[in-house]
Image (cartoon, rainbow, N blue to C red):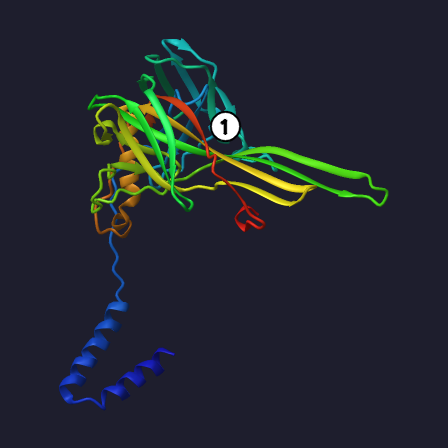
Amino acid sequence: NPSESFRLCLHSATHLNSKTMRKTLYIIFAIITLASCDIRFELNLPKEDSKIYAFCAPGARDTTAIIVELARFVGDSISFDLSKVEIDLRVNGESQEVQFQPKYTFPYGASYHSVPEEAFYFTRKLQSDDEVSLTVSYHGLESVSAVTNIPQQPEDATFRIETGDDSAANFILEYSDQSEETYYAAIFREKLHEFKVWGYIEENGEVITDTTDYTSWQPHHINHELDTFQESDFNFEAYNNQTGVLFWKNSDAIDNGEKKMVYFSTYILKDVEEWYNELNYKYLDFSYEATIYRITEDLYRFYLTNLMSKENSLSYLGLSRNNATYTNINNGFGVLGGMAGHTMMYDTTISYQENYFPEIY
């Protein structure tokens, strides 16, 4: 009850000396006055048309997704139907067939597919130096366009994992490139091969056994953050866009004299062999896949400014300017940035026996 609370505050204030009581009452009335203020002002925003947003990073796979959205201006009620978007995508001037992926139906959700739902895509194995041009059109909006080139693949790339006594590990990538103006990115995946045998002996002595043998993949996210106070030869400037992509400028990588090197600290699962008896046992084999990409400067700048914008929490409170995200999309937003990758596997051969290993269940 506000009235009761106010009465108690006044009652408490009477037990203070006069000077303290005046200060207390002043603070109470100031809080009540500020809480009851009703300030009205006109928000005179300049009129702007909504614009098309497009994201496409050709070269990562044979199938390339094209994500198109509407960057809607405040108050704009224009309807937007993705199925009516027109896309003209060309590789070295040759028009490509572009298809649309509608929403996936349960139980096979988007996580099981390489193309996001409600996205466009085209299929073609792209080569280094291929020119890719994109034009996106929609009735009532200004068309947007961009051009990019597929960069050269990383040269002499290697991947290894260094482990300690526990589950901590370093993912180390090395490659040859002494240029100051090239850019890179990396993603990691975890592969699990599980082989299980279980069985029993019937009363007549017959042995009944069955086996399970399957392989699964999942992204391996690394929570890399640049620590500017860390005094280490391995402290280099790389960024994590929080979706599994780590990216950096080549001049910021570690130069070991012959190659450039980057490393990321993480935790991994080691191989496990469980024996219950001769008829019941299980073997878990973990291995890790690394794909290192050379990316265009446009894609690097988009990733970097987008990350900086997300981390500028003060802008949401109106206490700082919002960081603009870089775009190379003419008349719109987003990015068209080429990339070329090289994939490597590393099998963790460290094995040990355990009767019970709860982390795997």
Residue 1: percent from left, percent from top: 38, 79
Q: Identity of the amino acid at label 1?
A: Ser
Count of numbered labels shown in the rendering: 1
Above or below, 207 against 25 in this view is: above
In this rendering, does residue 272 appear at all? yes
Task: Please state if 179 lies on the left or on the right of 360 as rendered.
Answer: left
Task: Kindly identify the residue that appears in the image at 64 percent across and 38 percent down.
Answer: 196
Residue 46 point in image, percent of width and height: 25, 39
Q: Nearer the viewer, residue 111 or 332?
A: 111
Task: Tell me residue 129's x, y (percent).
Answer: 32, 12
Asked whether, in this view, residue 287 is left or right of residue 232, the answer is: right
* Res 90 → quadrant: top left
For label 1, count other residues whose C-alpha is less than 10 Å away and answer few (under 14), some (14-19) or many (20+).
few
Q: Quadrant of residue 135?
A: top left
Quick one: 79 or 93, which is closer to the camera? 93
**Residue nearest the viewer, comparing 235 with 12:** 235
Q: Residue furthest right?
A: 204
Is residue 36 visible in the rendered image? The answer is no
Q: Nearer the viewer, residue 178 or 184?
A: 178
| Secondary structure type for disc 1 | loop
The residue labelled by disc 1 is: 114
Q: Give residue 198's position: percent from left, percent from top.
A: 70, 41
Q: Is residue 196 left or right of residue 88?
A: right
Q: Where 19 sits versus 212, above or below?
A: below
